[in-house]
Amino acid sequence: MAFELPPLPYAYDALEPTIDKETMTFHHDKHHKAYTDKLNEGVEKDGLAGKSIEDILANISSASAQVRNNGGGYWNHDFFWNTMAAQGDRGEPSAVLKAAIERDFGSIDKMKDEFNTKGAGQFGSGWAWLIVGEDGKLKITSTPNQDNPLMDVVSDKGTPLLGNDVWEHAYYLTYRNDRGAYLKAWWDVVNWNIVSKRFADATA
């Protein structure tokens, strides 16, 4: 097996009440596992064994639809789990990240509003992202299905700092069809410690 399902970095109920235990269990153990298994099948078919997931995503235009969909699903979910943290481990935006957010959006609240609007406006299933763009500035983007800003097929490429899954299976048990309520509540579980580290690494 080229890729393995990474374990959650916290207990299944660690994000309650924002994200319930049942959602986390099905999302990780069923959905993420399925992406992992199907990615491995596609990697074998495409002759990509031995390549890192980042290398595969960077050249996804030359891969099959199976690898694109499941490679994105595999990477996106691992990134998503680590973008969140249990209470006490979340921290605050670092001084340099906060300054960059204020420079490019005006304030953290304005950045969150733009992110929530982008996520709510993503038609069908997909993701909302905060990225460091190729010009070095912060930008809010969204992608359909399991695409992400690392792929060579997206219009807004860059280094993701945080991303939120707006597929219905990520929130439906608690929020039903109210994606907007889920997007607003989700900020309560964001792991600013790792988001700040990602920003530092991306701008080093």
Image (tube, rainbow, N blue to C red):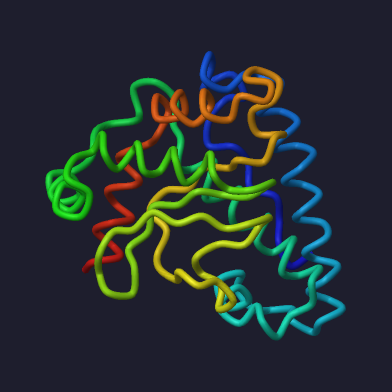
Tally the numbered discs: 0
Residue found 71% across the figure and 28% down from its top: 25
Residue found 45% across the figure and 69% down from its top: 156
Residue found 52% across the figure and 29% down from its top: 180
Q: Is residue 15 above or below residue 133?
A: above
Please tell me in which quadrant of the rendered image residue 52 appears: bottom right
Please tell me in which quadrant of the rendered image residue 132 appears: bottom left
**Nearer to me, 84 or 88:** 84
x and y, in percent, of residue 44 in the image:
84, 76
Furthest toward the top, the residue is 17
Q: Is residue 185 above or below residue 199?
A: above
Quadrant assignment for the N terminus = bottom right
Q: Is residue 182 above or below residue 29?
A: above
Left or right of 171: which side holds 9? left
Left or right of 182: which side holds 156? left
x and y, in percent, of residue 185 in the image:
46, 23
x and y, in percent, of residue 160 in the image:
42, 58
Quadrant assignment for the C terminus = bottom left
x and y, in percent, of residue 191 in the image:
38, 36
Left or right of 48: which side holds 105? left
**Nearer to me, 169 or 119:** 119
Residue found 45% across the figure and 57% down from its top: 141
